[in-house]
Image: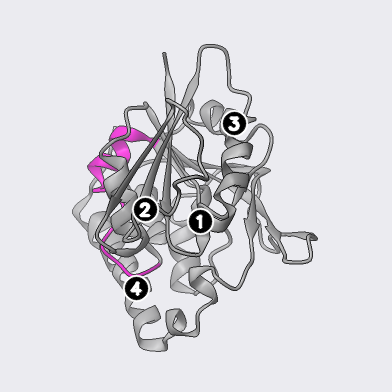
């Protein structure tokens, strides 16, 4: 049975919303014959999902040493068996049809990202202000945006063929912006698409990693971004391509 493997890292604080994340995943309608698998990795807090997630054979939960999102996602990737990979944060909500649209796009291209709606604490939602047009992504578009510090997409919407993610080494060892670095690497080696229909509610809350002032330390934030840029530039100069 063809499968899309959903990759989720869970940290202490983000797990408070994972029941809603599961419900949104359970309610996804997939194309005929398709199934989903959910690979959940607890980041340094064993058992934080116990009693929240149900017994469901489609879910695998493991724990490991605290290493932040990139490490947790890459550990979860090692358990993924699906032809396709989709990232999903433990505090976000999939919108109807999200995985179906990913599957359809990945029949045409090796990777895709999609629009999302910010979900604010008072319950209202707002769209991304700078979404690109739907359809094929112009090569180098997201690289140029990151260089100019104005990326127009949320990389938690990233989906791709599993062999591509494996060939790129999963999520690089960074304390943040690991999704950006993976997106830039994928953009270098293969064509992608932007899906204009929103795929998630991106939850804004005080416990989210990016809400902490420490996350935005100027020197560290610059280092994270530059690491992704320099890797992508080196790959382009080496002429790497994936097929």
Q: Nearer the viewer, mark 4 or mark 3?
A: 3
- Tell me whether circle 2 and circle 1 mark residues in contact (CB < 8 Å): yes
Nearest to N terminus: mark 3 or mark 1: 1
What residue is at 49 percent from the left and 45 percent from the top?
A: 51
Q: CA distance from mark 3 to mark 1?
A: 17 Å
Find out whether residue 129 is within the magenta segment: no
Q: Nearer the viewer, mark 4 or mark 1?
A: 1
Mark 1 = which residue? 15
What residue is at 40 percent from the left and 66 percent from the top?
A: 177
Mark 2 = which residue? 42
- Tell me whether circle 3 and circle 1 mark residues in contact (CB < 8 Å): no
- Element assignment for label 1: helix
Which segment did they paint magenta? 161-176
Q: CA distance from mark 3 to mark 2?
A: 20 Å
Nearest to N terminus: mark 3 or mark 2: 3
Residue 39 placement: quadrant = top left
Q: CA distance from mark 2 to mark 1?
A: 9 Å
Mark 3 = which residue? 26
Q: CA distance from mark 4 to mark 2?
A: 23 Å
Q: Which mark is residue 224?
A: 4
- Residue 208 in the image: x percent, y percent? 53, 68
What residue is at 45 percent from the left and 49 percent from the top?
A: 49
- Residue 210 in the image: x percent, y percent? 51, 72
Nearest to N terminus: mark 4 or mark 2: 2
Image quarter in which the C terminus is found: top left
- Element assignment for label 2: strand
Residue 62 placement: quadrant = top left
Nearest to N terminus: mark 2 or mark 1: 1
């Amino acid at each position: 049975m063809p499968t899309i493997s959903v990759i989720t890292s869970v940290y202490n604080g983000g797990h408070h919303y994972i029941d809603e994340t599961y419900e949104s995943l359970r309610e996804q309608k997939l194309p005929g014959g398709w199934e989903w698998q959910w690979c959940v990795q607890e980041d340094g807090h064993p058992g934080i999902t116990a009693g929240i997630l149900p017994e469901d054979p489609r879910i695998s939960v493991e724990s490991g040493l605290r290493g932040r999102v990139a490490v947790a996602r890459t550990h979860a990737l090692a358990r993924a068996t699906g032809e396709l990979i989709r990232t999903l944060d433990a505090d976000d909500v999939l919108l109807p049809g999200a995985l179906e649209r990913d599957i359809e796009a990945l029949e045409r291209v090796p990777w895709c990202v999609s629009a999302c709606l910010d979900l604010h604490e008072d319950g209202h939602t707002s769209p991304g202000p700078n979404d690109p047009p739907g359809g094929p992504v112009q090569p180098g578009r997201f690289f140029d945006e990151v260089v100019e510090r104005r990326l127009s997409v949320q990389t938690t919407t990233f989906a791709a063929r599993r062999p591509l993610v494996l060939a790129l080494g999963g999520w690089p060892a960074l304390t943040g912006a690991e999704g950006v670095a993976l997106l830039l690497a994928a953009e270098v080696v293969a064509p992608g698409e932007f899906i204009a229909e929103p795929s998630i509610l991106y939850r804004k809350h005080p416990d989210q990693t990016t809400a902490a002032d420490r996350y935005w330390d100027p020197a560290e934030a610059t280092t994270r971004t530059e690491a992704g840029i320099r890797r992508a530039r080196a790959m382009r100069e080496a002429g790497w391509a994936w097929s």
